[in-house]
Image (cartoon, rainbow, N blue to C red):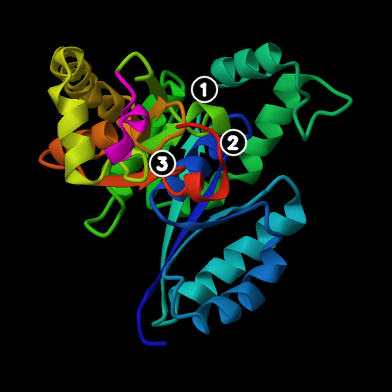
Amino acid sequence: MTDTLNLVVITGMSGAGKTVAMQSFEDLGYFCVDNMPPTLLPKFWELVKESVKVTKIALVIDLRSRAFYDEIIEILANLDNTQFVTTNILFLDASDEELVSRYKETRRSHPLAMEGRLMDGIQKERRLLTEIRNRAQMVVDTSTMSPRQLREKIFHVFKTSDNPSFHIEVMSFGFKYGLPIDADIVMDVRFLPNPYYVPAFKELNGLDQPVRDYVMAQPATEKFYEQFSGLLKDIMPGYLKEGKTSVTIAIGCTGGQHRSVALAQRLADDLSFDYPVDVTHRDMKKRKETVNRS
């Protein structure tokens, strides 16, 4: 393997946001490993070098013991000397007051103060992490940051052109087969006339032009579609601002073969002018397997 492997080591004070950081790197397409003992890192890296698919790694390293602390310093120094790895250390910090507040809020015990004062554990951890903090290429103080703001910070620094951008999933479905559990927005179009009852359309679906024309020609369809699509176009920038990487819009009719298919396809075509869009017709072919009406 000749490509450089990008390694981000996520570390810092307990309670400063390492979990949020790891989730952010997952959304950026990094292969993430939480709490790997540093002694396993060289072996893990040998396995990664043999893979042609993994080029970005984010490791959350737990430095709560002195032994781990000593090991990670030496291992990172060795990695810096190899041509295969580009290493960045992201150190997350927060004020003592904020860390105390977060521990009080979650009612957790600090890992270095299981039987002592919370402040004693925080101060001990801060001393242990002094050297790794000094080696970090990026130190982020999360004292006044919300999880969303930390995520935005990480995206701003580490997002590259090959990262997946915000995209929209449009899905048609039939209510009689159940709601899609991964939908963010669900719209019911069973109020529109059902093409199933037109003999010529019964064996067709919403991708067939005669069915699509029939659905779109209904008096209620155009008014509904203009309002629904306009609402979606208005709110999509809000999802982007909040850090969402995708939104799934599900449109359902009774069987998922006619009305929902026609409208989902039209919506996907329209939204694709502004966003990457994938369209799925979940239940469109199920009529061959059942005698229930669509």
| Nearer-N-terminus badge (2/3) | 2
Q: CA distance from mark 2 to mark 1?
A: 10 Å
Q: Element at badge 1?
A: loop
Q: Quadrant location of residue 69?
A: bottom right
> Which residue: 36% across, 76% down?
4
Please, which residue is most extreme toward the bottom here?
1
Percent x, y of residue 78: 53, 76
Q: Quadrant of the N terminus?
A: bottom left
Of 167 and 203, which appears nearest the observer?
Answer: 203
Q: Quadrant location of residue 13?
A: top right
For the question of whether residue 132 can be seen, the reply is yes
Q: Quadrant location of residue 177?
A: top right
Figure check: 81 above or below 110: below
Which residue position holds label 2? 13
Figure check: 238 above or below 140: above
Of 205 and 95, which appears nearest the observer?
Answer: 205
Which residue position holds label 1? 95
Q: Element at badge 2?
A: loop
Q: CA distance from mark 2 to mark 3?
A: 11 Å
Looking at the rendering, the stretch of residues picked out in magenta corresponds to: 193-201
Inspect the image, locate mark 1, and give the three-letter code of the amino acid beneath it.
Ser
The question of residue 274 being in magenta is answered with no
> Magenta part mainly helix, strand or loop?
helix
Callout 2 crowding tier (Cα within 10 Å): few <14, some 14–19, many ≥20: many
Percent x, y of residue 65: 75, 49
Inspect the image, locate mark 2, and give the three-letter code of the amino acid beneath it.
Met
Which residue position holds label 3? 139
